[in-house]
Image (spheres, coloured by chain):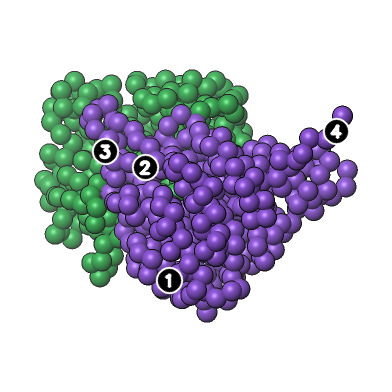
Amino acid sequence: MTAVDFSTTIANAWFPSPIFTASGCASSGRELAQFFPLHDIGGVVTKSVMNKARTGRPTPRMAETASGMLNSIGLQGPGIDAFIAKDIPYLIEQKARIIVSIAGETVEEYATLARKLRSVSGISAVEVNISCPNVENRGLVFACDPEASRRVIDGVRRTLGGELPIIAKLSPDVTDLVSIAKGVVDAGADALALINTVLGMVINLDTMRPHLGGKTGGLSGPAIKPIAIRAVYQVHEAMPKVPILGMGGISNGRDALEMIAAGASGVSIGTASFGNPMALMNISNELRELLALKGFASIRDAVGFAHRVEEAK
Amino acid sequence: MATINKNATSMQAVLMSNKRVGQYHQLIVNIGDSASLCKPGNFVAISVGGDSSRMILRRAFAISRVSSNSTFGGTMELIIAPHGQGSKWLCSQIEGAVLDVVVPLGTAFGIPTEPVPVLLVGGGYGSAPLFGLAEVLNARGCRVDMLLGASTAGKIYAPMEGKRAVNSLRIYTEDGSMGQMGRVTDPIAGLIADLNIAVVYSCGPMAMLSAINAITHGTEVVHQCAVEESMACGIGICMTCVLPVADEDGDVSMLRSCIDGPVMDGALVQWDKVGRAL
């Protein structure tokens, strides 16, 4: 078996590995650095940061479900200025490749965030999270509205200029994901992150009320993997040239290869890290072995392989 | 070098023994050299349910004691109440089972630099880590008095050998089935005054910690409490186990009980805001 070319590209950004953290599942990176070197993975996708510091939702913020969990954090974070001052330099010092995830309440807030990031060096790409489910007003989930999605991405693109790749993070909780994906690509997104968590709820039978402080939460973990694979497959089928960072319940090398075969150029690992701090390393090793076993010479060869035209018999 | 989780290791650890103790289980797990890194107040996160489990999250347990010189290498003792699916699975494991553990995690109890009188207060199986703590405090020369409380006798955890390091141990049950009838918080104010207590260490349900804090609030007595919030990861990445805590300037933020705790300064925890939006 020859060594597999494990590198991948997302728009103009090159990464030595297709395995990334998922936004909101690695905090700012410091917490995982004890378990593996952050430069050994494709990159760290940071927790979505907003313009101002934010305390997030009340507890309980978590409920374990069958093969999954609900979270209701509500974008707790330090705000972009503290993030740029403290977290980015740390990640650069670790020689990690950085994808900064941003979230806003208005189109203008996203543009403000983009403006503040424009002059920061050491960033590989910007993930524009327009699909966090844990906001008070569902109307603010931009990714549920094609027009609002377009406006956000357009504003970020104009502010950021042409160089830094924009990855738009979308929600699976929509009727027609492909049309929303096409809309944000038209507006200037270079790549897509699929999928954010799926909106869910648990009723606590002791209190006979919704268990989470925020009532609803985002479902993640293996329970949503088939939804994620489907979403990536559909979008890749419609736009095979647009790179996808795939995520949703990926917990082992086999899951990662499914995601890549569906059309993802990179795979983000989220909830699996909660259950195992070594998850990114284990998944990387398993994926590398599996690719070699299946005869793939590179990640590039495997991306979208499930879409191949049937060979003539 | 990592600054967070800096002593933590992810490892496969052999279960050396599993004994039922009243309503709890005492598990002894071989964690090798990591035992020497565990301090009272630290916890361990353990995978539950086996490889095909639908329980995807680890369960966090306080480490009650460690032993570094046993014939098997370093071991840790856990006292577990089998009340949820995960803890029931763990309590059903037999000797020789291999557990997937991450240890040690969390902030430990602070030990006074001077041999001052201290009071340890435990609720239910929250008393477990206090016995290891008592030994450390005793070695520091502190006079250690202990109060344990629970709703009923079966929920009191008080091993015979644990009493060696304490000057006095009083037990309170709400139904009077063991020790005195009443709440463990009843005698605290009196003991603080009589024994000139400098530090109260507490571990147990949040309501108990909050009640203790109401007693120490506004006094010179330091209250170090091990808090309880449901955790998904135990290593600081999920942001679910947060509590409102003030800093020295009085600014309140949501701190993670896994890495900024579980041991926190009770005077800084905003007890009235727990479970509320800030």
Q: Residues within 10 Å of mark 2 (few under 14, many from 20)?
A: many
Q: Are marks 3 and 1 on the same chain?
A: no
Asked if residue A311 shows in the view, the reply is yes
Q: Are marks 2 and 3 on the same chain?
A: no
Identify whether B61 is placed above or below B117: above
Q: Which mark is residue B205?
A: 3
Q: CA distance from mark 3 to mark 1?
A: 45 Å
Closest to the observer, A160 or A88: A160
Q: Sequence-wise, which precedes: disc 1 or disc 4?
A: 1
Q: Position of residue B106 (x, y in %)?
A: 43, 50
Q: Position of residue A224 (x, y in %)?
A: 51, 36
Q: Position of residue B206 (x, y in %)?
A: 25, 42
Q: Colour of chain B?
A: green
Q: CA distance from mark 3 to mark 4?
A: 67 Å
Q: Amino acid at mark 2?
A: Gly
Say which of marks 2 and 1 sits in front: 1
Q: Which mark is residue A312?
A: 4
Q: Which mark is residue A111?
A: 1
Chain displayed in purple:
A
Examine the image and state in which quarter residue B234 appears. Answer: top left
> Going 87% across and 29% down the picture, which residue do you hit?
A313
Q: Which chain is indicated by disc 3?
A: B
Closest to the observer, A184 or B146: A184
Q: Position of residue A294 (x, y in %)?
A: 80, 38
Q: Sequence-wise, which precedes: disc 4 or disc 2?
A: 2
Q: CA distance from mark 4 to mark 2?
A: 47 Å
